[in-house]
Image (cartoon, rainbow, N blue to C red):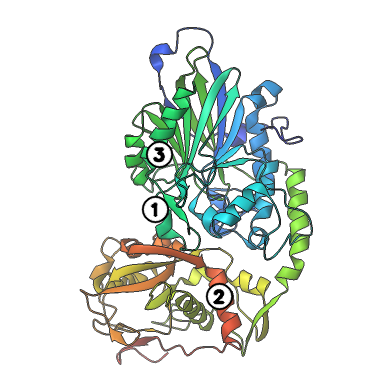
Amino acid sequence: MSVPGMRRAAIGLTALAAAALSTVAVNPSQAEAGPKPVDVKLLALNDFHGNLEPPTGSSGTIAGQPAGGAEYLATQLAALRGATEEEQERTITVAAGDLIGASPLLSAAFHDEPTIESLTMAGLDFASVGNHEFDEGADELLRIQNGGCHPVDGCADGTPYTGAGFQYLSANAFKTATGQPLLPPYAVKKVDGVKVGFIGMTLEGTPQIVSQEGVAGLTFSDEAETANKYARILRSQGVQSIVVLLHEGGQQEATGGINDCKGFTGPIVDIANRMDPSIDVVVSGHTHQAYNCEINGKLVTSASSFGRLVTDIDLQIDRKTGDVLTAKANNVVVTRDVTKDAAQTELITRYKTALGPVATKVVGETAEPLNRVQETLFGTAKGESPLGNVIADAQFAATDNEQGALGAFMNPGGVRADLDAGQVTYEEAFTVQPFANNLVTLDLTGAQLYCVLEQQFVVGRTLYPSSTVRYTVDVNGTTGTTADPCAGTRVVRGSLTLGGVTVTDAGTYRVTVNNFLAGGGDGFTALKSGTNQVTGMIDLDAFVAYLTASSPVSAPALDRIRTTAEVPAA
């Protein structure tokens, strides 16, 4: 798809070059035979999550560089497409899901319409559907694709919403009643006489990680089996070059760079191994990781998240047979040292102006200031805080009935501002919790819970507990190690209770954290052992709902973490 005004002259690409390339010779025996191959370029994204403005904090850097932001992404995409019309016509821009959902306020406030408009202007052609595309249900996803105002909020910015200028593909999400795919399962693009097929899918386990309302009336099928089915269909139509856009992924070792594949593991490995040999490239996502792999003769890539990387994939396709001869990839950092795209700047400015009334909406009230300063524990500020406890309470309230949570824990680094006494606006609430993390409710054994609490003293961060959590800390206890946090004895065994019930090592307990923590964020790797994970609402939504329902909110007592008598007075 060529979008007027967006195929710009190439900027200097020195700043875009990454450290390494991965090359897969898909059919090397044909590389020297026949007429000159057709060069096709794929530019791939995944897990954009509505990050129109440059993401901040650790989410705004990658490979040691500040990265991301739609204004820079559009410029970098234009540069990678090349300066000539021929180069641009041989470039196809694709994405592997979660373009929307769990988005910052600027996009989320308008049901992610700004993100769809931004990616359309940036020249996106095809995208698979991620699990977050189902956050508001199948009907809303179809509206996002086809256009029209939101049934409740209308076109909140005052302009019509015309839908996506790119095509979402969803081969393995079926309407249960009819057995038909919710969206087109595949698409074919002809480049200089050769056909390239694209199959789009999300992970089969989507119903287990989004709300039941989001996937009501839908059935999800096995990723590899579905890919193989549509690969056969594409081959019957004379398509021999096949790319799968799959919202599922894996991860490499922490020491791996953005173009490495060190110690690679995850669901995508088994899926790729079960895929038909006719599938040449798998553009993946979901895990927010960067990697550049060869699995079972297939190029398998991921561009991390939030628009910080673009995967530049070069294919050589046999002009006579249509087969991919070679495929190589390079993850390129979307640096912020290039000229901002003017059309993206205009879009962001327009929506920020329209956001004004939303930002100033009063969502609750505080009876007194709620600050995030932690109380002193062991002589350092590593204990509870009024605002941190309130947020933990909000997350528990959002998941106690629906998900069966018995308690909740919040990471202090996710609380970014204080709240003054009086009315609280939506923008103020958003400033407190700006990361759009999803709540994750999971099962832990009592022994695993104690390990999580012991890990607090290893990483130097105390999790804020909900009002249903109580435990005692021994100042004379020992701290575990990074390799074995469970060996610590800081938390008095037998003191931990959830909802007044004493936690035993052998018991199983359901608790809520955000997805950052659930993935081992802030060093809490013990939480990765959680099972039966269910992804719920965004943390900000839970916070706003709690403020609205509980106003005026008072500062809770800081008595959820107690100390033994041996602890000296502060």
> Callout 3, which amino acid?
Thr
Marked residue nearer the N-terminal end (3 or 2): 3
Residue 198 rendering spot, x and y as whole percentages = 51, 33
Residue 328 rendering spot, x and y as whole percentages = 47, 27
Question: Which residue sits furthest left?
Answer: 506
Select label 1 or label 3 by which is in front: 3
Residue 439 rendering spot, x and y as whole percentages = 47, 67
- One can see residue 70 in this view: no
Dot 3 corresponds to which residue? 226
Secondary structure of the residue carrying numbered label 2: helix
* Front residue of this view, candidates 485 and 199: 199
Q: CA distance from mark 3 to mark 2?
A: 39 Å
Marked residue nearer the N-terminal end (1 or 3): 1
Q: Quadrant of residue 230?
A: top left
Q: Residue at x 55, y 63 (%)?
A: 436
Q: Residues within 10 Å of mark 2 (few under 14, many from 20)?
A: many
> Callout 2, which amino acid?
Phe
Dot 2 corresponds to which residue? 543
- One can see residue 221 in this view: yes
Q: Which mark is residue 205?
A: 1
Q: Residue at x 36, y 37 (%)?
A: 272
Q: Residues within 10 Å of mark 3 (few under 14, many from 20)?
A: some
Secondary structure of the residue carrying numbered label 3: helix
Select label 2 or label 1 by which is in front: 1
